[in-house]
Image: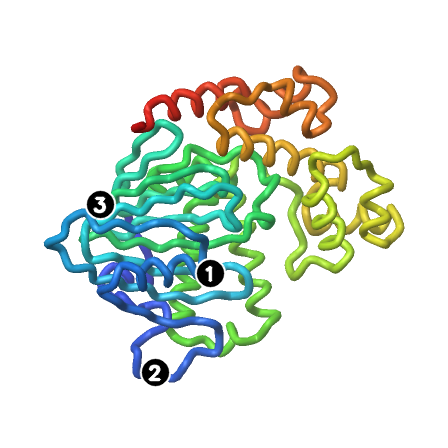
């Protein structure tokens, strides 16, 4: 058994640890605890924090005993979840709003994705990508901590490590032992939430802790870190530029168009993107186009062509697109297309 800290150990037995006992006064930070025996209520509780999905109770003879304890800093939420019955959790929608880091606390579960199947035991973790479908088979004894991170906070962080691994055994895999530091920091955060820390009610303290958590996530779970981003909320001009880029990925836009949308001088735009996103505006545009191209493949029936995607997202030519795609996702776009095609052939008619 891996050595969790005291807070994570308590979460194995206390369903409501993150916000403490139900009789305590409401914490100074957003947080709540919920329990239900109804499938739809359980589904709604988790969907509200993350995104739409499906929950299926595996046996009609089992009674759901769902528990969801939730706390958040600003944009990042921590969720203590258990179902108390054998369930399937199916996540089919793509282009989701969040990455989700799932850390198994106790019990057993299996997750299937991209043609692979993994067994998750206590201490294993999975970083769920917004553009990948997942199917979980969760045992009645399983409990986990799920950390929701808005997708834009992790985009461009590099290629992720092997998605399911035992953190205790892989602490040395990340820069500066990042995995161990990540678990220690999560243990600290959970303990402060449980104690109802008044400091977490202060906006600057919450923002600083959230920024530290995001940076530790990137250091622990991605092979290459992007330039460190400044803590705090993105400034308005970066938001405007980012929204413009997202809305025009398949159009022939350039730096002048992004500068016009941001309504700031080009030097200010470059400084803002470098400081808060870790990339130049044009590199961010390229990353977002590659992510959208992959999302298109995963949402298709496998009939897309590499040339069509390169043309759709203004990548110059198919060879350059394939090279950039392979650099980002460690496989050729043709390999992703073929895997999706084979998965479609295996689906029941």
The label on residue 108 is 3
Per the model, the C-alpha gap separating discs 3 and 2 is 32 Å
Residue 195: image quadrant is: bottom left
Q: Give coordinates of residue 184: x percent, y percent.
A: 41, 55
When the figure is inspected, residue 185 is found, relative to residue 90, above or below; the finding is below
Q: Identify the secondary structure beneath mark 2.
A: loop
Q: Give coordinates of residue 151: x percent, y percent.
A: 55, 48
**In the image, 107: left or right of 210?**
left
Label 2: how many Cα within 10 Å (few below 14, some 14–19, many 20+): few
Scheme of colours in the image = rainbow
Q: Residue at x 68, y 47 (%)?
A: 277
Q: Residue at x 13, y 55 (%)?
A: 62
Is residue 139 visible in the rendered image? The answer is: yes
The label on residue 77 is 1
Residue that numbered label 2 is attached to:
24
Q: Identify the secondary structure beneath mark 3.
A: loop
User: In front here: 158 or 331?
Assistant: 331
Which comes sooner in the sequence, label 3 or label 2?
2
Q: Give coordinates of residue 34: x percent, y percent.
A: 32, 69
User: In front here: 341 or 194?
Assistant: 341
**In the image, 38: left or right of 295?**
left
Q: Residue at x 55, y 32 (%)?
A: 296
When the figure is inspected, residue 50 is found, relative to residue 292, above or below; the finding is below
Per the model, the C-alpha gap separating discs 3 and 1 is 23 Å
Q: Residue at x 38, y 25 (%)?
A: 343
């Amino acid at each position: 058994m891996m050595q969790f800290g005291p807070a994570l150990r308590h979460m194995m037995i206390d369903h409501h640890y993150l916000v403490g006992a139900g009789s305590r006064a409401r914490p100074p930070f957003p947080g709540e605890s919920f329990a239900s025996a109804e499938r739809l209520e359980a589904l709604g509780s988790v969907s509200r924090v993350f995104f739409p999905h499906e929950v299926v109770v595996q046996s009609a003879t089992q009674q759901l005993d769902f528990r969801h304890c939730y706390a958040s800093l600003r944009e990042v939420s921590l969720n203590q979840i258990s179902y108390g019955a054998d369930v399937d959790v199916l996540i089919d929608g793509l282009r989701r709003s969040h990455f989700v880091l799932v850390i198994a606390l106790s019990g057993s579960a299996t997750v299937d994705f991209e043609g692979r199947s993994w067994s998750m035991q206590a201490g294993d973790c999975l970083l769920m990508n917004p553009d990948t479908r997942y199917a979980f088979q969760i045992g009645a004894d399983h409990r986990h901590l799920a950390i929701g991170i808005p997708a834009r906070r992790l985009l461009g962080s590099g290629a992720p490590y092997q998605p399911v691994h035992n953190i205790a055994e892989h602490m040395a895999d990340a820069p500066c032992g990042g995995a161990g530091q990540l678990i220690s920091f999560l243990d600290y955060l959970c303990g402060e939430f449980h104690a109802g820390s008044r400091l977490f009610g202060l906006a600057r303290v919450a923002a600083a802790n959230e920024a530290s958590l995001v940076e530790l996530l990137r250091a622990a779970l991605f092979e290459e870190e992007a330039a460190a981003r400044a803590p705090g909320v993105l400034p308005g001009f970066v938001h405007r530029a980012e929204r413009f880029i997202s809305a025009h990925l398949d159009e022939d836009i350039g730096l002048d168009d992004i500068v016009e949308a941001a309504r700031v001088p080009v030097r200010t735009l470059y400084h803002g993107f470098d400081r808060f996103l870790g990339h130049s505006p044009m590199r961010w545009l390229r990353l977002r186009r590659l992510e959208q191209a992959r999302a298109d493949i995963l949402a298709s029936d496998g009939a897309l062509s590499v040339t069509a995607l390169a043309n759709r997202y203004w990548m110059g030519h198919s060879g350059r697109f394939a090279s950039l795609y392979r650099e980002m996702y460690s496989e050729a776009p043709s390999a992703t297309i073929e895997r999706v095609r084979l998965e479609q052939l295996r689906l029941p008619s």
